[in-house]
Amino acid sequence: MSQRNGTVVCPGTYDPVTLGHLDIITRTSNVFDKVVVGVVNNPLRKNKTLFTAEERKGFIETAVADLANVEVKIFSTLLVEFARENGAHAIVKGMRAISDFEYEFEMAQLNRKLDPGIESIYVIASPHYSFLSSTGVKEMATFGGDVSDLVPAPVAGALAERLSGR
């Protein structure tokens, strides 16, 4: 694609970041001028994160270091507020399967109510990553499964270290 348009945010918990997340971020960076990856500081849907927001931000920054138009920030506000603060006119999220649709549809409608000027855009996961979730990766790593082909190398190492005592 040769046309790129403005700034977008790619929000998520990224606990941990997976190669599926990075695929969505990379593909989005090929379409938009600037991609702000928003790391949710205190996610409501998850009790506690395995990695701190700073650790998650660092993993992503390392993984996207070669993407000049990608910036990673931590946020603790409403998503539409974060988008406005960063001059974004769209929120980009990955969609793996039909099971993601119901939740994402509801969130898109709520975000639209809060700010109709910020669009929700969904990027369909590449087939290779359509099964991949942070939760699944953590479960595999907890029981000693090899996750090296699912996450960046620094994340695989950190998972092994963090979960070794469980």
Image (cartoon, rainbow, N blue to C red):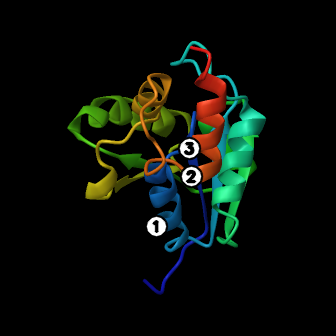
Residue at which label 1 appears = 27
Q: Residue at x 60, y 23 (%)?
A: 164
Please name the residue shown 21% across and 38% down the image: 98
Mark 3 vs 2: CB contact within 8 A: yes
Residue at image position (56%, 14%) is 166
Question: N-terminal of the two: label 1 or label 3?
Answer: 3
Q: Which label's residue is closer to the chain start, 3 or 2?
A: 3
Q: CA distance from mark 3 to mark 2?
A: 8 Å
Identify which residue is drawn at 64% across, 58% down.
63
Q: Residue furthest bottom?
A: 2
Tell whether 144 sits left or right of 33.
Answer: left
Amino acid type, mark 2? Pro
| Kind of residue at disc 3 | Val
Q: Is residue 50 visible?
A: no
Which one is earlier in the sequence, the residue at label 2 or at label 1? 1
Crowdedness of circle 3 by 10 Å Cα count: few (<14), some, many (20+)? many
Helix, strand or loop at mark 3: loop
Residue on which the image places disc 3: 17
Where's the N terminus, which quadrant? bottom left
Instruction: Between label 3 and label 2, give the one nearer the viewer.
Output: 2
